């Protein structure tokens, strides 16, 4: 088995191993209802748009951002810089790099057209393009994607060579792709757009080929690969235990008021340790803030009342499930092994910790409903429902899972 096939098989096995936890029944149900709710809100938003809405600007900015997102799946590992660098010029390594490029461009095109499909209802609402015009738009998207992919491949090599011009490539790529997309959608001058495409391609090739030699930036792509796998493992760690996952510790002194300093009993000591880990370790506290931010934005923009209750219940369940792996954090710490601590006390402390975090989350969401809708009955009803679900989730679901 050649190196590329071996690395690809290992990557698929790793994604499958943790992907089944990320896409379990709970996540599937949540994504289904989220998709339905998002589609309904999208349709409602479309019908509320005025005829003067700058749809082309919004679509082009969105697609240009997606187009300039450039994940490159090199599947390289840290030790490769020592063992594979001497084989850089061989046919095997050239074939390895070509297959990595093919996999990356296929994935990027897939993401681009999924995002374009999301934009199609907005485009149809304001335009009446013919089939030929839609075909030209698709071809322009493909060509622009190939162009930006090439630019970022060259940028990696220029960074390796420490060329100052590498810093201008993301800006040049974004402005170029946005301008050509805007001309395509807004003016419909397809002949001009095609001419601009060839001019831009020609200038890019001439400008960059004289700057870049045929080198492969091993260190750059290894760091990018490690960063991507690190993100995947951190995501998987929200639903299952990931061995040897490095956890970043952040002090976050600004939120220390959320911790209770009471540590008079064993249970209070456990609760303090769980609370401090929630605040300082990993992404538990940032996820808390992100979910609140998304909830506030949706409630404010759509002025939800009963809908805010439904959304809040979904977010509450989602966050409770993400907190579940925290039970394993201190399980193998030395102080827990040495001190004569009762396991049932640890279990009760974790249940109270989960309940406390969900109460805090419920109070924040209910306060947001009151602030952004000015309806007392929505606030009171949401608070009662959220607190009730928090108690049931922690007392029954969490108690049976740990």
Image: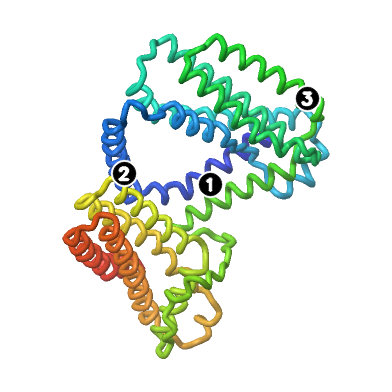
Q: Nearer the viewer, mark 3 or mark 1?
A: 3
Q: Give the camera-side residue of 108 and 303.
A: 303
Residue at 29% across / 51% down in the picture? 299
Q: Residue at x 60, y 30 (%)?
A: 175
Image quarter of the N terminus:
top right
Question: Disc 3 vs disc 1: Cβ atoms closer than 8 Å?
Answer: no
Task: Report whether 396 appears left or right of 328.
Answer: left
Q: Is residue 28 above or below residue 241?
A: above
The disc at residue 209 is 3
Question: Where is mark 1, residue-wise?
Answer: 14
Instruction: From the viewer's side, name the closer residue of 300 and 381.
Output: 300
Q: Which mark is residue 34?
A: 2
Q: Position of residue 77 (x, y in %)?
A: 68, 47
- Residue situated in front as seen by the camera: 56 or 72: 56
Location of residue 245 in the rendering, given as x and y in whole percent from the top left corner: 57, 60
User: What is the spatial separation of the Cα atoms under label 3 and label 1, in whole angstroms?
Assistant: 37 Å
Q: Secondary structure at mark 2?
A: helix
Which label sits on residue 229? none
Of the numbered discs 2 and 3, the one sitting upstream in the chain is 2
State how far apart marks 2 and 3 are (Cα). 46 Å
Q: Residue furthest front?
A: 52
């Amino acid at each position: 088995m050649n190196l590329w096939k071996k690395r690809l098989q290992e990557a698929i096995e790793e994604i499958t191993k943790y992907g089944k936890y990320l896409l379990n029944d709970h996540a599937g149900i949540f994504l289904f209802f989220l998709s339905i709710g998002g589609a309904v809100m999208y349709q409602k938003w479309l019908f509320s748009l005025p005829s003067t809405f700058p749809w082309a600007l919004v679509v082009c900015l969105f697609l240009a951002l997606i187009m300039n997102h450039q994940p490159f799946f090199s599947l390289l590992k840290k030790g490769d810089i020592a063992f594979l660098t001497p084989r850089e010029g061989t046919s095997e390594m050239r074939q390895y790099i070509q297959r990595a490029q093919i996999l990356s461009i296929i994935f990027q095109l897939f993401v681009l057209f999924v995002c374009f499909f999301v934009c199609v209802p907005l485009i149809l609402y304001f335009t009446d393009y013919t089939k030929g015009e839609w075909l030209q738009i698709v071809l322009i998207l493909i060509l622009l994607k190939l162009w930006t992919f090439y630019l970022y491949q060259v940028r990696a090599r220029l960074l390796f060579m420490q060329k100052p011009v590498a810093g201008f490539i993301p800006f040049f790529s974004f402005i170029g792709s946005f301008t050509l997309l805007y001309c395509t959608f807004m003016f419909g001058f397809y002949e001009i757009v095609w001419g601009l495409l060839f001019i831009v391609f020609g200038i890019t090739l001439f400008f960059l080929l004289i700057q870049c030699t045929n080198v492969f930036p091993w260190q750059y792509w290894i760091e990018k690969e490690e960063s991507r796998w690190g993100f995947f493992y951190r995501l998987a760690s929200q639903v299952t235990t990931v061995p040897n996952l490095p956890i970043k510790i952040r002090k976050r002194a600004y939120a220390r008021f959320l911790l209770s300093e009471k540590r008079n009993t064993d249970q209070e000591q456990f609760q303090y340790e769980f609370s401090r880990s929630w605040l300082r370790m990993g992404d538990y506290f940032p996820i808390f803030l992100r979910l609140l931010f998304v909830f506030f934005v949706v409630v404010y923009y759509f002025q939800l009342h009963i809908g805010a209750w439904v959304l809040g219940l979904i977010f509450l369940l989602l966050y409770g499930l993400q907190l579940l792996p925290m039970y394993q954090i201190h399980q193998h710490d030395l102080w827990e092994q040495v001190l004569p601590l009762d396991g049932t006390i640890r279990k009760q402390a974790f249940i109270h910790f989960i309940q406390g975090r969900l109460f805090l989350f419920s109070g924040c969401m209910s306060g947001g409903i009151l602030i952004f809708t000015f309806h007392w009955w929505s606030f009171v009803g949401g608070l009662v429902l959220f607190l009730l679900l928090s108690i049931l989730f922690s007392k029954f679901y969490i108690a049976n899972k740990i």
